[in-house]
Amino acid sequence: MLLDRAGDDAYNTVYYAQGYGFSGGCGLLMDIAGDDRYIADDTDLVHIGDETPKHNESDAQGYGAGRRGDHTDGHNMSGGLGILDDLDGDDFYSAGVFAQGSGYWFGYGVLNDERGDDRYRGVFFNLGASAHFAIGVLFDNEGNDQSDLVMTLGFGTAHDGSAAFYIDVDGDDVYTMSAADERAVSLGSSLNNSFSLFANIRGNDRYAPVGNTMGYSMARRGGEWAQYGPTTGLFFDIGGSDEYLAGPGSENGSWKEHHDVGRGLYGFGIDTDAGLIRFERE
């Protein structure tokens, strides 16, 4: 555990840090106050993973992971718990692949930011994302935030038997994807028997996503996989006057994204001024 009580701090690493939990372990970074900078360097490419050759695999900033061996030597190890908890201040988070409330291979990653006008930059499997039977969570409360998911898979997106949550309460927020293409998946979207939720509550928000987004669901599997493990993606924006520059979203609207009950696909998006959200049985 790293506990910092006050001050404007700079945390710099390349990988395996800032709230990282590996198999059987728990890593916690808690910062109580101050305008802080959390950097997992993505400029000097010394730790490239499988997802993209253009960025480092960070494994940081609230990341829990295990050892996946089903495609190599068969020796698997379930993941640990990684938590980054920042309680106050205008903070900046920057990382490459797998960071900022993300989980991998039965791991559990959490990033919680309580208040402040924050900025986030993540690349791939960031900002509330998970893969292979894992859980990734990002909570942000109070503040006008700017978030850029550079490539794909984030803002509450899960893959392969996983769950992902991105929940933001209060503030006027901006969501962009600066270097993504049409293959990107984001904002409460779900892949292959997973559950994903993106929820923004109150505030005047601006969305500029790319690709498959806002309650999108997709699965390559059928049969019992679809029957007993459905793929569900949910996007909710409740309150505020919101702007949708791309994707299926619309102010005070609702939509279905790649929705097919027969194949176990459930993709919904809703923008509403206030109140409860009801779902009718099909």
Image: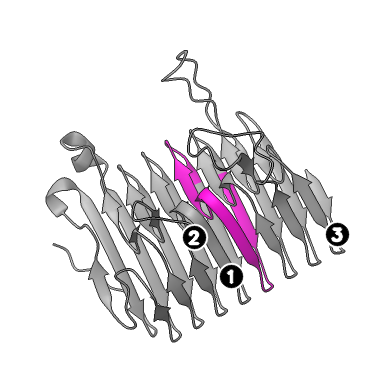
The mark nearer the N terminus, 2 or 1, is: 1
- Residue at image location 74% in from the left, 68% down from the top: 88
Q: Which residue is mark 3?
A: 5
**Nearer-the-camera pick, 45 or 160:** 45
Q: Is residue 149 above or below residue 163?
A: below
Q: Position of residue 206 (x, y in %)?
A: 47, 77
Between tags 3 and 2, which lies in front? 2
Three-letter amino acid code at disc 1?
A: Gln
Most frequent secondary structure within the magenta stretch:
strand
Q: Quadrant of the C terminus?
A: bottom left
C-alpha gap between disc 3 and disc 2: 26 Å
| Secondary structure of residue under mark 1 | strand
**Nearer-the-camera pick, 49 or 142:** 49
Q: Is residue 243 above or below residue 86?
A: below
Q: Which residue is mark 2?
A: 166
- Residue 147 on the magenta segment: no
Q: Is residue 57 above or below residue 232?
A: above
Mark 3–mark 2 CB contact (< 8 Å)? no
| Secondary structure of residue under mark 2 | strand
Q: Position of residue 36 (x, y in %)?
A: 77, 62
Left or right: 75 as drawn, with respect to 224: right
Magenta-drawn segment = 109-135
Q: Which residue is mark 1?
A: 146
Q: Quadrant of the N terminus?
A: top right
| Secondary structure of residue under mark 3 | loop
The mark nearer the N terminus, 3 or 2, is: 3
